[in-house]
């Protein structure tokens, strides 16, 4: 999927060097097709790293993707240069007031899971975002805390604190091999996990219409389909780079806090050895299947999205 990005966005050069098909505005306008408009509501502190991760997955196939970067209107980030945010991001309030519609929207995670949802400074606006998706977005993908927030707002399913952080690469079972989002998936796969909270299967099962597609014996439900709201929720991190868990581990070691090795991640549990990526193919499958489902079902006329 050629993904249309500004040529001066850092992800443009990063993905070009990796062989991902990236398209400039000039080239995109010469193609006589309608690109799929995908929004990325980026709640992560490391904005550029997160942009790269999702753009890499969204831009891996044959369709033209137009990626729009969105931020919360009032919340300010301290980890990304203000110039970058000003140049490449639009506040949600501006997107909402423009009346434009999207074929897809990714709502990322955020490192605030220890807080009750109502204590998050931008919770009221995020609730507006989720409600807005029902009329202005064809399919929404909530990731980690973003998925938990969507389930809580739409269904009242609460997150629960864990006794210890779920941290590492955990095995998961494919519970719905015939589901269109799992096309090409193995019966068993490894997925990176990094969270202090969980969603409980019994509470998900109590909500009519929610279907768990992937789950781990140690870490519980992972991927949930919410067909009625045209949404997917994933609580773990297929989008992670090979060294993302290592970066988190090194950060916590440097901070002097108590930290355990990420499970099943470093070869021989030796942090000096580079980790091997064992989830990349399934990451591309999942996001490719999501984009394919959007392409197959979204209205050609964007004005009809959400109607």
Image (cartoon, rainbow, N blue to C red):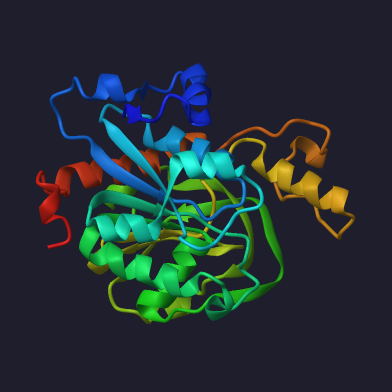
For residue 33, above or below residue 86: above
Left or right: residue 53 compared with residue 226:
right
> Which corner quadrant holds the N terminus?
top left
Left or right: residue 114 compared with residue 145:
right
* Residue 127 % position (x, y): 40, 72
* Residue 61 % position (x, y): 32, 29
> Which corner quadrant holds the C terminus?
bottom left
* Residue 7 % position (x, y): 43, 24
Residue found 65% across the figure and 32% down from its top? 276
Residue at the right extreme of this rendering? 256
Any part of residue 140 in sight? no
For residue 61, above or below residue 206: above
* Residue 94 % position (x, y): 34, 56
Residue found 39% across the figure and 58% down from its top? 92
Query: Residue 6 lies in what quarter of the image?
Result: top left
Residue found 43% across the figure and 70% down from its top? 125
- Between residues 255 and 189, which one lies in front from this camera angle? 255
Any part of residue 158 in sight? yes
Residue found 57% across the figure and 73% down from its top? 120
- Between residues 204 and 253, which one lies in front from this camera angle? 253
The number of numbered badges drawn on the structure is 0
- Between residues 254 and 258, which one lies in front from this camera angle? 254
Query: Residue 67 lies in what quarter of the image?
Result: top left
């Amino acid at each position: 999927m050629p993904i249309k990005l500004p040529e001066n966005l850092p992800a443009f050069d990063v993905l070009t060097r990796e062989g991902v098909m990236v398209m400039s505005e000039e080239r995109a306008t010469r193609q006589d097709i309608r690109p799929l408009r995908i929004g990325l509501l980026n709640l992560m502190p490391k904005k550029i790293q997160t942009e790269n991760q999702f753009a890499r997955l969204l831009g891996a196939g044959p369709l033209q993707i137009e990626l729009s970067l969105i931020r919360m209107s009032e919340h300010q980030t301290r980890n990304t240069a203000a110039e970058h945010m000003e140049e490449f991001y639009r506040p949600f309030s501006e997107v909402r007031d423009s009346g434009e519609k999207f074929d897809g929207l990714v709502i990322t995670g955020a490192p605030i899971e220890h807080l009750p949802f109502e204590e998050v400074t931008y919770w009221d606006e995020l609730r507006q975002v989720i409600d807005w998706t029902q009329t202005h977005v064809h399919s929404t993908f909530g990731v980690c805390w973003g998925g938990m927030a969507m389930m809580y707002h739409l269904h009242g399913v609460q997150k629960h604190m864990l006794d210890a952080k779920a941290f590492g690469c955990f095995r998961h079972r494919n519970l719905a091999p015939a589901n269109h989002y799992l096309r090409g998936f193995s019966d068993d796969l490894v997925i990176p996990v990094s969270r202090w909270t969980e969603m409980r299967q019994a509470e998900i099962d109590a909500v009519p219409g929610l279907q768990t597609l992937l789950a781990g014996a140690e870490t519980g439900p992972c991927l949930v389909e919410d067909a009625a709201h045209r949404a997917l929720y994933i609580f773990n991190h297929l989008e992670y780079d090979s060294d993302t868990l290592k970066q988190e581990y090194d950060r916590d070691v440097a901070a002097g806090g108590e930290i355990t090795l990420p499970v099943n991640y470093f070869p021989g549990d030796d942090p000096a050895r580079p980790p091997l990526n064992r989830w990349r193919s399934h990451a591309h499958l999942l996001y490719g299947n999501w984009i394919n489902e959007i392409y197959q079902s979204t209205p050609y006329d964007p004005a009809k999205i959400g109607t």
